[in-house]
Amino acid sequence: IVDFFNNITNRNEVEIVTMDLYSPFKNAVKAKLKKAIIIADRFHYTRIIGNALDSLRIRIWHNTKGNEKKYFKNLKKKLLKDIDTVPKEKLEKFENSLNHAFELDGNLKYGYQLYQKFLKIKSSSSYIEKVKLFRDWLDDAQSCTIPEFKSASNTLLLWNKEIVNSFNYSYTNSSVEGKNNKIKVIKRIAFGF
């Protein structure tokens, strides 16, 4: 990466770089593109929180038996769904199906609330409000007793500045990520050829 940046003749003119949360890439950008503002890609840091919730679900699933085990195994999609996108006519049924899981494990309920609270940050109207909600979320996640969310919040703390930058700019890696994913799918379909 550093060699690539060394070959860019006008690298001091680069103003903004979006990236996933990969520290060596961030270090290379800081070293070679000194004037660039680094923006953490929303998809990647949101996925970290989703993965924390799913890891909690899996841990609970491993510690259950019988019908409960099957129930927790099939709960992933519902847990990771943004509740604001559930149609009003289906909302009560959706909430009832989750409430059964929350009765079985209180930590899952709190983890779900943390996840939904994090999703609300992106729909806030102003930069200042997003920053405040993000700081509040970090405080909640840092003070909770769920190891999966403590770990996720520690990662987000390391990328705090870059995540806050993403609240102020609308840039994203989505088109590059989409092309990269398409290439990977084609390679997989072609069995590596």
Image (spheres, rainbow, N blue to C red):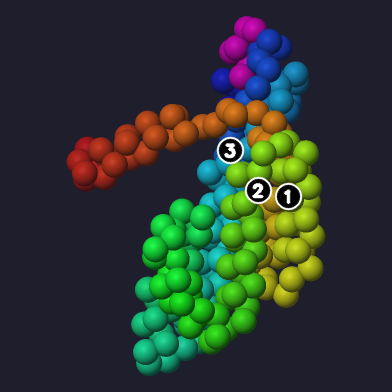
Q: Residues within 10 Å of mark 1 (few under 14, many from 20)?
A: many
Mark 1: which amino acid?
Phe
Indicate the quadrant containing the C terminus: top left, top right, bottom left or bottom right: top left
- Quadrant the N terminus occupies: top right
Task: Confirm or deny contact between disc 1 and disc 2 (CB under 8 A).
Answer: yes
Q: Which residue is mark 2?
A: 121
Secondary element under disc 3, as helix, strand or loop, is loop
Residue type for callout 2: Ile
Q: Secondary structure at mark 1?
A: helix
The magenta stretch spans residue 153: no
The foreground one among 13 and 101 is 101
For this rendering, which residue is in front, 30 or 91? 91
Residue holding disc 1: 134
Highlighted range, magenta: 5-10
108 w.r.t. 158: above or below: below
Per the model, the C-alpha gap separating discs 1 and 2 is: 7 Å
- 10 Å crowding of disc 3: few (<14), some (14-19), many (20+): many
